[in-house]
Image: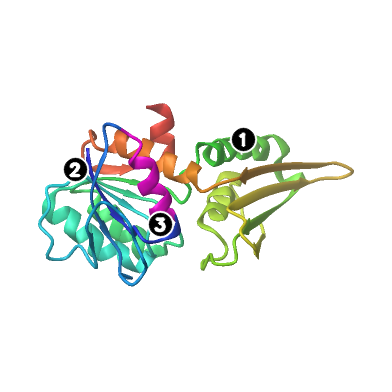
Amino acid sequence: MKIIIHGCNGRMGKVLADLIAKEKDLDILCGIDSNLDKPSKTPFPIYKELNGIELNADLVIDFTHHTAIKPMLAWCIMHQVPAVIATTGLGPEEHRIIQEAAKQIPIFQSANMSIGVNTLCRILEIASNSLGQSFDVEIIEKHHKYKKDAPSGTAFMLVDAVGHHCPIHSIRAGTIPGEHTAIFAGSDEVLTITHTAYSREIFAQGAIAAARFIVNQPPGLYGMKDLIKG
């Protein structure tokens, strides 16, 4: 499978490239990054943007910024290339663009590529249904100080899983890869559920699993629930 890494010079892009290099059935065709000034010893070519690039790719994996989604998907549609979108901080406009593009190409999109986090979402659905409105729910999320979006896209995923509005508290400090905690506080009892990411590799591994899944799917919008079922 010939892969384009969209955002190859970012933290996640570099981790993803290292993992793909260890997979015998995967090959990095090229990288795309708006910042070409960063030193790179990558064995694949790096371009500033996809626009104007003619490449026979099987897939694009995106770990960039929400503002880069629209031109990336336009290129994917033009060349009929599936996409895995792992970028966080997407707003209503980006989600609309993704839904429209998914009518023409297969797209895998998740605010968090960790199987553990997506299992946490399923647990929260069960907890919320069991505990009902008698428990107050709050979400605490912690990330490294360089993460720009707050709250995290994963925190919003957890709120959706709970099924009703609950406060989100964001912490940006140090080098924390990611920690999400859901607190259910009732009368004289508290249920706390936490997922901790100890490295960024779990997100890259999830993106690779998504790539293997999406490349053989018909046009449509897919997520971690589809991958876990598959």
Q: Amino acid at mark 2?
A: Asp
In the image, residue 68 lies at what x, y percent? 31, 66
Q: What residue is shown with label 3?
A: 87
Image quadrant where residue 194 sits: top right
Cβ atoms under marks 2 and 1 closer than 8 Å: no
Please say if 123 is above or below 11. above
* Magenta segment includes 17: yes
Q: Nearer the viewer, residue 167 or 67?
A: 67
Label 1 or label 3, whichever comes before in sequence order: 3
Q: Amino acid at mark 3?
A: Thr
Left or right of 193, for residue 178: left
Residue drawn at x 60%, y 66% is 145
Label 2 or label 3, whichever comes before in sequence order: 2
Q: Tell me the quadrant of the picture where the C terminus can be found.
A: top left
In the image, residue 24 lies at what x, y percent? 29, 31
- Toward the front, the furthest residue is 41
Crowdedness of circle 1 by 10 Å Cα count: few (<14), some, many (20+)? some
Q: Is residue 109 visible?
A: no
Task: Give the number of the disc on residue 123.
Answer: 1
Colour scheme of this structure image?
A: rainbow
Q: Which residues are magenta?
A: 12-23
